[in-house]
Image (cartoon, helix red, strand yellow):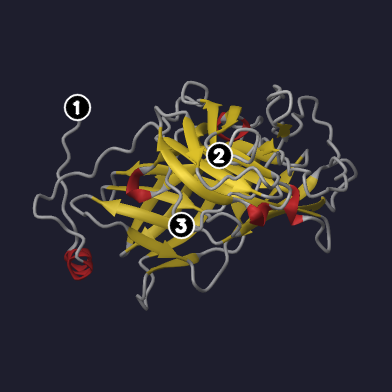
Amino acid sequence: MKIYRWFLPSSLMVLLAIAGCVTRGGERPETPPKSAPRSGPGDTVVAVADVHPAEGGVTASPASPGGPTDTAGAVVAPVPVAPRSADTVVPVMSAPMSFNVRAKALGKEVNLVSEGISDLAGIACTEEGGKGTSGDVLNVLRFAHYGRSDSPFIMNWVLFIPPGAGTMSAVKNPGKAGSGYRVTLKGDLRFTTLLKGATVPIRLTARTLTPEFVGISRSWPPHDVTLSLSNGPIPFFADSAHAPLLTVLDANFILGRNATKYFAESPRIIRAEPVGGKKGGPGGGVRLEWQGTGSIVKPIEISGYNIYRSPTPGNSASWRKIGTVAAGVTSFTDNEYDGRKRVAYAVTHRAEYSAGYQYEGVIERPYIMEPK
């Protein structure tokens, strides 16, 4: 076991003391769990796939595809987007990822490196971005990676793009024919760090520049591609600080070949039974039961489930979170359901990352309740 001797530069100690972040014990921050995430208020899930009507029960369907896998080196063309109705759901593209970031903090170089491509980090997008002026656009629902750095500062960190605050677009590579797509990922990239001895995370945002990452992919949506920072260096600021606390010099994100289980597999509602109310009339609530996903999404260890309701599952803005339960619970009663209107329900899993970040799945299998 390694034994660390750890000292903070006096300038950083002053910064943390002002912020009220340092504890007396100066203990090493907790090692990040072998799981991840927490979605705070406003963390709206905006992707759904595979509607299952209540009549006849829920039928099994394949997991959302993670996009074409190009094993022969050929360019795979985008799939045409079909017209959608109020109930047509939006498919989700996802991929596990790894990355490396080289930055400077307080004059010292900081390297944030992940250990290979893993489901513990990932990206999930939908086609809701539509058509851009020069090509297809995907809306970024989830983009997160967490890890630990032991030099020059001992800290846990999470790097993420808030839901809906990023896009990924593609245009035909202007190079030779059949050479693929030029992919651009850009968004409100943020860092949350928890230093050793601190109790309050430091949250960093890029105020002056929006980071952009560019790469060439043989398929669209992209898989098995490296996206590199194209407009660095990018300064990141803590709260109202006037000077950047961290500056990203260069960074690379590598997307895996296949879909990530964490986004491709979601809890499936298997039963929805009205409760209360008069016999033969509208109910006074509905009890939902679903299949747990704890064993499916390993190595991520989920901490619980979030329950959503929508009158129009094809409209991403209509989904509202109505409850949360712990990981060992696979049922929930919506007391507001009265059986008079058509409504859809969905469940997502969630996991807790270090530094107070919640990593939430996406809505994949809505269950529709028809009016009685």
Q: Nearer the viewer, mark 1 or mark 3?
A: 3
The residue identified by callout 1 is: 1
Left/right placement of residue 361 relative to residue 325 reads: right
Residue 117 visible in the snapshot: no
Along the line of sight, the residue nearer the viewer: 40 or 207? 40
Identity of the residue furthest to the left in this view: 24
Quadrant position of residue 14: bottom left
The residue identified by callout 3 is: 41
Along the line of sight, the residue nearer the viewer: 28 or 263? 263
Quadrant position of residue 186: bottom right
Along the line of sight, the residue nearer the viewer: 48 or 28? 48
**Quadrant location of the N terminus in the rendered image:** top left
Q: Which amino acid does label 2 sit on?
A: Gly
Q: Label 3: state its secondary structure.
A: loop
**Marking on residue 277:** 2
Please count the marks in the image: 3
Q: Which amino acid does label 1 sit on?
A: Met
